[in-house]
Image (tube, rainbow, N blue to C red):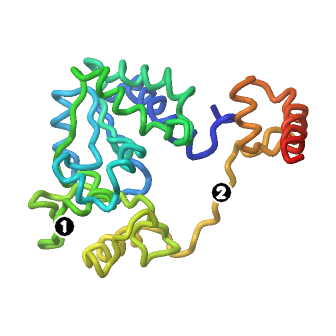
Amino acid sequence: MKIYFNAFELSSCLKPFFVAHLLRKGFEKIVYLDADVLVVSNFETLFEMLDQHAFVLRPRLQPNLVQHSDVSVRQIADLGIYNGGMWGVRHQDGGMAVLEWLMRFLPHIGFDDRHNGMFVDQKILPLAAQLFSSQFGCMRHPGYNVAYWNLHEREITSINDRYMVNGHPAIFFHLSGFRAEEPDTFSRYSSWNFERLPILKEIIAEYLSYIPPEPLAKPDYSYDHIGSYKVSPDLRRHYFIHRTLTGYRKARLKGTIRRWLRLY
């Protein structure tokens, strides 16, 4: 996986492996969160759900409001009905079975390749929810996973230094598409801005307060090189298909010749 997946694909597809590892270490309940979140309250509601369900996800949108979103129905279907930025998993009564199923299939279909119906773990989560419906719980609390794709259905207020969402305590904001080097843009994926929803500026300011003021150097991806090979997308694909780097240069040359012949 570290050879044929890029950094985004690998980090997404390792989630069930990591969660399963922690459960085997003795943890009973695990909450997974993406790195780009601002947690503002506790996860009591989610842990209570995990008393009843072995695997809990949060849908991107409420079903009766999807038509009002800046993000179209087609885009939501393309991104995935459930957002993979939060998982709740319980060890007993089916949680490990869901993880084992994900660990079986994600190494083969966990690519960021939406032209071929794949988007890391996002596209497979609805199928997991259906196949393991007796163990699955759907989080409806509006304070979870507040993000650009559902801001149209969330009324966010601040009362006594506490964020509220539709009258419920906010749990966490998912700042998908935010970049610290562009602090005036809430998300590069949507039109939401501070003028349209002023409280977003307060949320971003709090998020930035936890980030070091000096920008960190972007680390190199550890698996961008294998020996003398620079691992290109074509090389990753070759390795995925053949499970070896042998023959890549010859195959690449043949591909170049075929493209050249088509031109003439």
Image position, residue 32 (x, y; %): 37, 41
Q: Disc 1 vs disc 2: which is toward the camera?
A: 1
Secondary structure beneath label 1: strand
Which residue is drawn at the image coordinates 33% and 35% (left, top)?
A: 30
The answer to whether residue 223 is above or below residue 35 is above
Q: Quadrant of residue 151?
A: bottom left
Q: Which residue is mark 2?
A: 219
The answer to whether residue 197 is above or below residue 247 is below
- Three-letter residue code for mark 2: Pro
The answer to whether residue 109 is above or below residue 166 is above
Q: Quadrant of the N terminus?
A: top right
Image position, residue 44 (x, y; %): 17, 44
Q: Given the current orientation, which residue lies at the most extreme bottom position?
A: 195
Q: Which residue is mark 1?
A: 156
The answer to whether residue 229 is above or below residue 29 is below
Q: Spatial distance from mark 1 to mark 2, Cα to Cα?
A: 35 Å
Number of the label disc, if any, that sits on residue 38: none
Nearer-the-camera pick, 114 or 96: 114
Query: Is residue 39 among what the camera can see?
Result: no
Image position, residue 36 (x, y; %): 42, 57
Nearer-the-camera pick, 58 or 170: 58
Which residue is drawn at the image coordinates 17% and 44% (left, top)?
A: 140
Secondary structure beneath label 2: loop
Q: Is residue 108 left or right of residue 237?
A: left
